[in-house]
Amino acid sequence: SGAELNGASGEMVPELEKATVRIKHPEHVMGIIRSIKEQGMSKLQVISDFDMTLSRFGCNGRRCPTSHNILDNSHVVSEDGKKKLKDLLHYYYPIEIDPDRTLEEKRPLMVEWWSRAHDLLSQQKILKGDIAQIVRESDVMLRDGFNELFDQLHEYDVPLFIFSAGVGDILEEIIRQANVFHPNVNVVSNYMDFDDNGVLKCFKGPLIHTYNKNNTVLQGTEYFQQLSTRTSIILLGDSMGDLTMADGVPSVENILKVGFLNDKVEEQRGKYLDAYDIVLESDETLDVVNGILRYIL
Ligand code: C5P
Ligand code: MG
């Protein structure tokens, strides 16, 4: 359990003793956290996934929507459109999280899923002016503790980069409605392209899916180059695809990878423990991340 494994670390970061916490190499992890603290917050940047990392996976036994699902389920999509989008989800989502398939196998299938979903959505005459209401009427929830996370990072001028394969217009509206879209937040995601009448016509490229969240889709953004002095990284993700989000950072001195393991916990545990420094199993909160930041800041 978290408590047994992490007894020593608990003195520094009490949240690491939560039962949801799993760490393969506790001393190594505490070493990284200590170095990040020594380097100071002026060297720190946070790189985070959005869906199912900053937003909740479930609530009271029910799944919470991703930014795509928010659109799929909204009143602006026809019944026929909803059915087709749901069919795509049921076909491709198990592939996305299948621990027995390689990323090379998954990549073309993810491109297929995103392209088909974006084509279907682009046929629905979705209005730019509808987005705020669509988000307001959705069941989306940010993880408990999101206020503290966003507000602390803002207060200490720590850049937060949200790198999402979801829908940028939707996720920006979520954090705007939650009053945490502070100036230190930058988002790279899939954005909608509206015509002159504000009707969705397509999605802008490059297409970002679960398994190309790396420098190939960031070319030309210069984001990480501008932050080249920020050599301490906290990376937050929920997918094996999120592990490459910091690949474009020019010089990394310390990187702490925190992974939310939401689904198929038993089946995916081994891979997550190998890849992420800290694994949070079915933990719907940002407690551990906030605890680490409280220690560092
Ligand atoms: O923000 P993030 O990168 O996590 O967004 C990607 C998530 O959106 C994936 O986990 C995937 O399951 C979900 N998705 C979806 N509907 C689609 C495409 C992706 O719910 N059409
Ligand atoms: Mg995600």
Image (cartoon, rainbow, N blue to C red):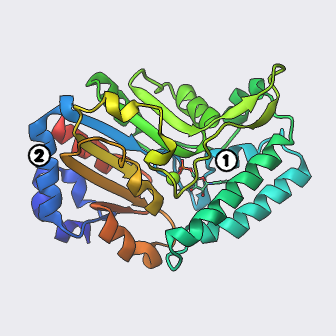
Q: Secondary structure at mark 1?
A: helix
Q: Cβ of disc 2 within 8 Å of ligand 2?
A: no
Instruction: Name the residue beneath numbered marker 2.
Output: 35
Q: Characterize the local packing of mark 2: few (<14), some (14-19) or many (20 or more) Cα atoms within 10 angstroms.
A: some
Q: Name the amino acid, label 2.
A: Ser
Q: Cβ of disc 1 within 8 Å of ligand 1?
A: yes
Q: Secondary structure at mark 2?
A: helix
Name the disc covering residue 161, or none: none
Residue 169 visible somewhere in the drawing: yes
Instruction: Name the residue beneath numbered marker 1.
Output: 68
Image quadrant containing the N terminus: bottom left
Q: Name the amino acid, label 1.
A: His
Is 34 displayed left or right of 214 in the figure? left
Q: Residue at x 40, y 31 (%)?
A: 223
Q: Quadrant of residue 234?
A: top left
Is 54 displayed left or right of 82 in the figure? left
Looking at the picture, tell me which residue is in the foreground, 73 or 215: 215
Looking at the picture, tell me which residue is in the foreground, 248 or 197: 248
Give the mark nearest the N terminus, 2 or 1.
2
Q: Residue at x 73, y 35 (%)?
A: 134
